[in-house]
C-alpha cells in the first residue's frame, strides 16, 4: 500500500481523559483521508502505524489504522 503525504502536513494524536484526539492541518487531513481510502481498498488485516518518529508531530501518541 502506498502512502502519499501532502506537502506541509501536520498531524498530532493526544490521549486525554475522555478519549483520543487527532488534530491536523488541511494537508494532514487530506493525507489521513488518503490513507483511509487506501485501507478501504486493501486486504483485511492491512494496517498503518503512525507515530512521532515517522509521521506525527513530536509528543504524539502512536496510532494504528487497521482494515478489518
Image (cartoon, rainbow, N blue to C red):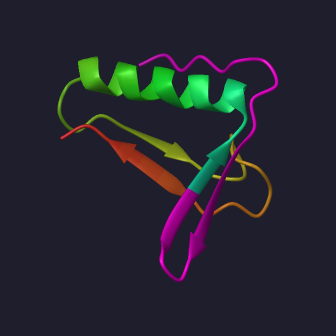
9 versus 23 height, above or below = above
48 versus 6 height, above or below = below
Specify whether residue 20 is painted magenta: yes
Residue 13 point in image, percent of width and height: 62, 57
**50 with respect to 27 (left or right):** left
Residue 58, by quadrant, is bottom right
Residue 14, by quadrant, is bottom right
Quarter of the C terminus within the rendering: top left
- Boundaries of the magenta span: 1-21
> Which residue is drawn at the image coordinates 51% and 54% (left, top)?
63
> Which residue is drawn at the image coordinates 37% and 21% (left, top)?
37
> Which residue is drawn at the image coordinates 49% and 45% (left, top)?
49
**12 with respect to 64 (left or right):** right
**67 with respect to 61 (left or right):** left
The residue nearer to you, when weighing 7 against 42, is 7
Residue 1 point in image, percent of width and height: 41, 19
The residue nearer to you, when weighing 65 against 20, is 20
Residue 7 point in image, percent of width and height: 78, 18
Specify whether residue 23 is painted magenta: no
Q: Total label count?
A: 0
> Which residue is drawn at the image coordinates 71% and 53% (left, top)?
52
Amino acid at each position: 500500500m502506498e502512502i502519499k503525504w501532502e506537502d506541509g502536513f501536520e498531524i498530532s494524536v493526544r490521549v486525554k481523559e475522555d478519549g483520543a484526539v487527532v488534530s491536523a492541518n488541511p494537508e494532514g487531513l487530506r493525507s489521513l483521508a488518503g490513507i483511509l481510502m487506501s485501507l478501504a481498498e486493501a486486504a483485511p488485516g492491512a494496517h498503518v502505524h503512525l507515530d512521532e518518529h515517522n509521521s506525527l508531530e513530536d509528543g504524539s501518541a502512536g496510532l494504528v489504522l487497521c482494515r478489518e
